[in-house]
Amino acid sequence: MSKRILNFLVIEDDDLSRLNLVEALKSHGLVREARNSEEAIKLLNEEKFDLAWIDLDLEKDLAGLDLIPIVKSKRTYAVVLSGREEDTNIEEAYKRGCEDYLSKPFDKDSLNMILRKFRVLSKESVLRNFFANQYVTQDDKLIENLKVINEVITTNKPVFLKGATGTGKTLIAKLVHELIFEDDKSFIHLNCSEIPENLLEAELFGYEKGAFSGAETSKKGKFELADGGTLFLDEIATMPMVLQQKILRAIDEKSFYPLGSETLVKSDFRLVSATCEDLEDMVKNGSFREDLYFRIEGFNIDLPSLSKRREDIPLLIKHFLGKGKRRVVLNSEVKNILNSYSWPGNIRELRRVVEILQSKSHGVIGVQDLPSHIKGVCESEAVVTSIDNKLVHGSILTKMQLEYIQINGLKSFVEKVEEDALAIVLKENDEKVRKTLGVLKISNSAFYRISERRKDAGSE
């Protein structure tokens, strides 16, 4: 995506200050200059400007204040530049409509911050399109929560996404990247849980030829590849403790050494990280470093499970049905079952189920077409008893369980087994925890970890 050429108006009576600002802006767009209010008003009436930079003290003290409402009336983003630090002047400038008040002398970081903020605020259509065609929701609380993205671009703080598997964390990470970076900057995505522990360090930092057995050529790591763009560390909670210490410097100082190299590599990236785990609990029990936790926190966004957004389920079903080339119709019984199902795999599971239904040879979808584990939510005895739930040959898994794993993943299945087993055995032992621990052969910490997860699922 190429940058849109911006039109700037610099209103400054000091020749040196005006020249410095004009030179700084030239690489970002077209610049016109005004030395006083009269010249500024004439240009504003003749041309359309995206941003105007206004010095408060022009031909007389605080004359720039009177220009702010004129600039705003032209739908131009107003930025005040001034050496005045009095609260009364700052307050008055904001009251009259300025978007930002910056102190002189002006620097490159301030310029970049203003331009990032302006571009995001001018991308309302991107956000509308995102909620209409990608992250479909009518949950006002969620939309309000996601508005923090508008604030992300004004600082270099990291973004931390928390939500169950399948809630759309990758989509949000890509949205943040798209809003911040105008041109083709890198979006580097690494799912920490998918890389074996002994290979994760090399994947992150890269390595020199001969750094270890099998390193026949040099390779850049994710940190280096993300230079100038976004590094998205997905499922960061799965990162081993020994590696957590090593990535602190890379994240904090934006510099690191590739494996087998003595040359320091610098990389300036925006960090976005995500997890489905409770990092605060992991910090408390010592399985995640507290200092790393505080490094990755910044703008925190919680993405609720689909079971907390039930009004969105019909919208999402319609959305995913519409994305396929082939059109099918769900009968009313199927719709009722899908609307009442808990969707432990969230949006990802729903999308996969819709794809399965669209692949059926007939066009009117009935209960018999649903995956077996979803049929089980139906209270009709006839439907439940018709499910083919035999053991898979040579396995302790039933066909229903295997199907659940194929749609939701092994991790989700294991968590579900833990929760169900704990609930059943605890009830059989009259809620006696010690006896339940003995039967299940688990530790106290494991018991309370699973119990907390069951409690969270129940609240949904």
Image (cartoon, rainbow, N blue to C red):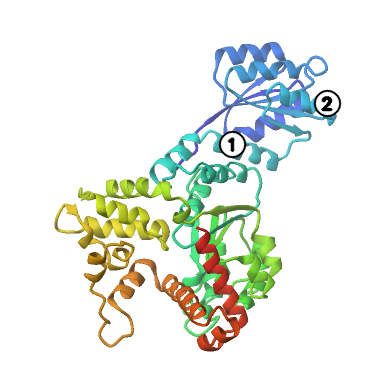
Q: Is residue 55 above or below residue 155?
A: above
Q: Is residue 366 above or below residue 218?
A: above
Q: Camera-side residue: 271 or 399?
A: 399
Label 2 crowd (10 A; few <14 / some 14-19 / many >=20): few
| Residue 152 seen from this side | yes
Spot occupied by residue 314 in the image (x, y as percentages of width and height):
35, 47
Query: Residue at 39% across / 59% down in the picture?
Result: 348
Spot occupied by residue 44 in the image (x, y as percentages of width and height):
60, 15
Residue indicated by mark 2: 88
- Point out the residue furthest to the right here: 86
- Point out the residue furthest to the left here: 362
Q: Camera-side residue: 337 or 155?
A: 337
| Residue 263 seen from this side | no
Query: Residue at 55% across / 65% down in the picture?
Result: 455
Query: Residue at 64% across / 69% down in the picture?
Result: 281
Q: Is residue 84 above or below residue 221?
A: above
